[in-house]
């Protein structure tokens, strides 16, 4: 387990869990940040495991973080970090409400269906770059128009198509009522 897993599960309200489901939902946390850190320190003292480093977790290279995110994370979390559906009723959650420590803890502990990204697979510097990219992505504005949550051209095209068909139907009904 380690302090990283405890921090992720408890600070996001996923633990303690009320009942066993396909996936633990994010809820308001039951414990304060200080209590969460104390629980993590206790677990770390008796069992060891990965820990979340202190200090600035956003000091990584932004471009490298974007590349690493697209290679390792976007297939589940969506290229905009909005999450997505997985198998058996599970899903990859949105990264919007996640803090730097929560993202780092998730990479180290691999909650639910997420793989564990140990320091051998993704170095601590690369993890910091990914966090920098995700947090920068959350702060950046859409370049124009309504981005529909940055879900991409297919949903945007679907909305335009539905509005276009709806407008066409209204026009047909109006012409029919006139004649």
Image: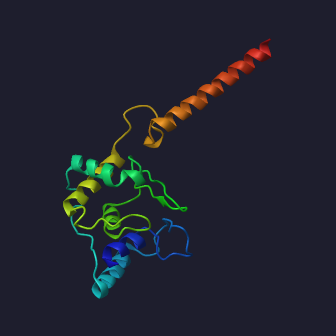
The furthest residue to the top: 179
Foreground of the two, 1 or 37: 1
Residue 73 visible in the picture: yes
Residue 55 in the image: state x and y as whole percent.
Answer: 21, 65
Q: For the point 22% across and 49% down, which residue is it?
A: 64
The image quadrant that residue 39 belongs to is: bottom left
Image location of residue 26, percent across then percent down:
48, 65
Place of residue 164 in the rendered image (x, y in percent of width and height, measured from the top left): 59, 26
Q: Is residue 8 left or right of residue 30?
A: left
Image quarter where the N terminus lies is: bottom left
Q: Is 177 displayed left or right of 145 in the figure?
A: right
Residue shown at 28%/86% (left/top)?
Answer: 45
Residue at the spot 68% in from the left edge and 19% down from the top edge: 171
**Figure disc tally:** 0
Q: Where 44 sits versus 127, above or below? A: below
When asked about the image quadrant of residue 110, the answer is bottom left
| Quadrant in which the C terminus appears | top right
Query: In screen coordinates, is 121 left or right of 25?
Result: left
Q: Is residue 135 visible?
A: no
Residue nearer the viewer, 94 or 112: 112
Q: Is residue 73 above or below residue 4?
A: above
Residue at screen point 21% across, 62% down: 123
User: In the rendered image of this protein, does residue 106 appear above or below residue 143?
Assistant: below
- Please provide percent x and percent y for residue 20: 55, 74
Image color mode: rainbow
Q: Residue furthest bottom?
A: 46
């Amino acid at each position: 387990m380690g302090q990283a897993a405890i921090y992720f599960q408890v600070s996001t309200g996923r633990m303690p869990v009320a009942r066993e489901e396909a996936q633990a939902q994010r809820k308001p946390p039951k414990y304060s940040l200080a209590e969460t850190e104390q629980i993590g320190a206790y677990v770390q003292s008796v069992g060891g495991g990965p820990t979340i480093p202190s200090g600035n977790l956003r000091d990584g290279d932004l471009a490298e973080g974007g590349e690493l995110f697209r290679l390792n994370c976007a297939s589940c979390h969506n290229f905009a970090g909005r999450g997505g559906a997985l198998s058996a009723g599970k899903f990859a959650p949105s990264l919007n409400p996640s803090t730097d420590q929560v993202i780092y803890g998730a990479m180290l502990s691999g909650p639910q269906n997420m793989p564990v990204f140990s320091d051998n697979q993704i170095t601590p510097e690369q993890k910091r770059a990914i966090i920098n990219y995700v947090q920068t992505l959350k702060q950046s504005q859409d370049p124009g128009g309504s981005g529909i949550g940055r879900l991409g051209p297919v949903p945007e095209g679907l909305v335009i198509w539905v509005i276009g068909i709806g407008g066409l139907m209204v026009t047909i009904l109006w012409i029919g009522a006139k004649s």
